[in-house]
Amino acid sequence: MFCCNVRTECGVPTEKIPDALNFYLPPEISVYDCKEVDYDFHARYDSKGKEYVYLIYNGRYRNPFYEDKAMFYPYELDAEMLEKQAKAFIGTHDFSAFCSVGSEVQDKTREIYDCSVSRNGDLVEIRVKGNGFLYNMVRIIVGTLLDIQRGKIEKGTISQIIESKNRDNAGATAEACGLYLNKVYY
């Protein structure tokens, strides 16, 4: 579930707004609740943090149920080793090396509260929680972990990559299909 904000003077009671909106919304979107908040509240800028999940289907053959829902990676993937590598992302850092080239964001300092890698059968899940994220940051984190798995980036060098602030030192940008905004914290 996610939060959005709207400003209205429609006169409809707040408890009736979900029914009114759901009448017009497509089936992929549903409103569950409505609350009156301070006028200055902004669903995006007032969040305290977010959690992203990236899914990798790590089976030998494609699974049609995960097509366009998880990245297909048919090669060896050592989730335990990647879990250890992922811990280097935790903390407050300048993540310039993990931001798309050409970003006009001036301050690239973000705090990562947790970064974990786990496996459940053929499904590998990478979870990243932080106070904010740069454009493509999570996908570049995932791509860097996969490049460590492939041997293109040396194990134990994530801290050095972060310190370099150089996008060329980080891994490839993982494809978009496995990325999900999982939670927003207020």
Image (cartoon, grey):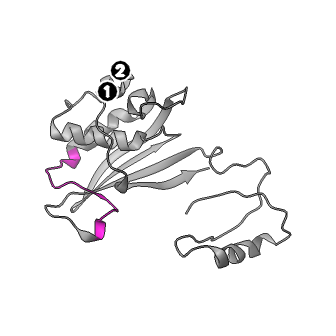
Foreground residue among 166 and 90: 166
Name the residue rendered at 69%, 56% in the picture: 5
> Few, some or many C-alpha atoms within 10 Å of disc 2 (few <14, some 14-19, many ≥20)?
some
Indicate the secondary structure of the residue bearing disc 1.
helix
Residue 166, percent from left and from top: 36, 23
Which amino acid, mark 2? Ser
Which amino acid, mark 1? Asp
> Few, some or many C-alpha atoms within 10 Å of disc 1 (few <14, some 14-19, many ≥20)?
few
Q: Which residues are magenta?
A: 65-80
Judge left or right: residue 45 versus residue 93: right
* Relative to 57, residue 31 above or below: below
Name the residue rendered at 49%, 34% in the picture: 111
- Residue corresponding to mark 2: 164
- Residue corresponding to mark 1: 168
Residue 152, percent from left and from top: 18, 33
The answer to whether residue 162 is magenta is: no
Disc 2 and disc 1: Cα gap in Å?
9 Å
Residue 168, percent from left and from top: 31, 27
Residue 21, percent from left and from top: 68, 73
Disc assigned to residue 182:
none
Judge left or right: residue 159 versus residue 106: left
